[in-house]
Image: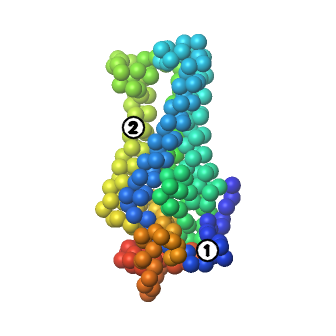
Amino acid sequence: MNNTTLPSINPVENPKARYALAKAWNRIFARAIDTLLLTLVISAIAILIIYTDAAGLSGAFDLTDKWRYFLIGLESCMLMFFYFLIIPLWTKGRTLGLFIFKLKIYNLIPTRNFFINLIKREFFLWIILALTNLALGITLWVMKNPTDFLKALLLQTTTDDSKTKLSAGIFQTLWGISGVFLVIVIIHMCIFNKRRCFIDHISDTVVIKLVDISSNDPNASANAKMVKNKRNYGLPGEIVAGAEDEINSL
């Protein structure tokens, strides 16, 4: 898992590679695709785990085998780590959403460990959420009667038990933190279109769009001019013209 090399495109295969800082709407829709896909997969597996219990889907709040709650928390945690950490590491900077929009995550500083930077990028968005789900699974597993807690957690009922209220509040708060940070990231990207938002800064990464000057990509026309004093990202090829203001403002 130790990968200290910069994810890169072979300059021999693509000697005319040029780069532009990714636009906000590209990044937002790429993240939306990733989130939707991951949510569907996690939900499908969770339903299957509940369905195979003796209580069935109708008894999801009171499963016969409580260890299934832990299994749901574990699978959601592992899938989040796998999708946002292992897949980008394996594909050298891409998830399905990034691939669809021709985007890629790169190290701003080539000597930095790419896997560590991925952890920094996703810590507030997915890692907190993943660990929260795992902790929730363990909590439900060890509880004698998780039914009231689950209903309070999902706001389906109220309870007078202070411990249940406190526990539910803690998990709701942790879920909320990830949601708030996601909104902040989206707003930041919209306000500072094409620029690096705060998760890029804390992780020393940059999200770029590859433009081949020989392609039919409408952005390819930006490669017609040379930009002076371009910031060096350690990438093969050059940053395209038209993004000079964004690059100089980093």
Image point (67%, 61%), residue name: 3
Instruction: Please tell me the numbered disc located at residue 176.
Output: none
Q: Quadrant of the C terminus?
A: bottom left
Q: Label 1: which residue?
A: 14
Residue pushed farthest left? 191
In the foreground, 135 or 50: 50
Q: Position of residue 17 (x, y in %)?
A: 55, 75
Quadrant in the picture for residue 53: top right
Crowding near pointer 1: few (<14 within 10 Å), some, many (20+)? few
Does residue 133 appear in the picture of this structure?
A: no
Crowding near pointer 2: few (<14 within 10 Å), some, many (20+)? few
Q: Position of residue 47 (x, y in %)?
A: 53, 25
Q: Position of residue 79 (x, y in %)?
A: 58, 41
Q: Nearer the viewer, mark 1 or mark 2?
A: 1
Amino acid type, mark 1: Asn
Label 1, secondary structure: give it: loop
Q: Quadrant of the N terminus?
A: bottom right
Position of residue 65 relative to residue 213, above or below, is: above
Does residue 175 appear in the picture of this structure?
A: yes
Quadrant in the picture for residue 7: bottom right
The colour scheme applied to this rendered structure is rainbow
Q: Label 2: which residue?
A: 173
Image point (61%, 78%), residue name: 15
Amino acid type, mark 2: Thr
In the foreground, 58 or 14: 14
Position of residue 121 relative to residue 194, above or below, is: above
Image point (40%, 75%), residue name: 243
- Left or right: where 232 falls relative to 227: right
CA separation, marks 1 and 2?
47 Å
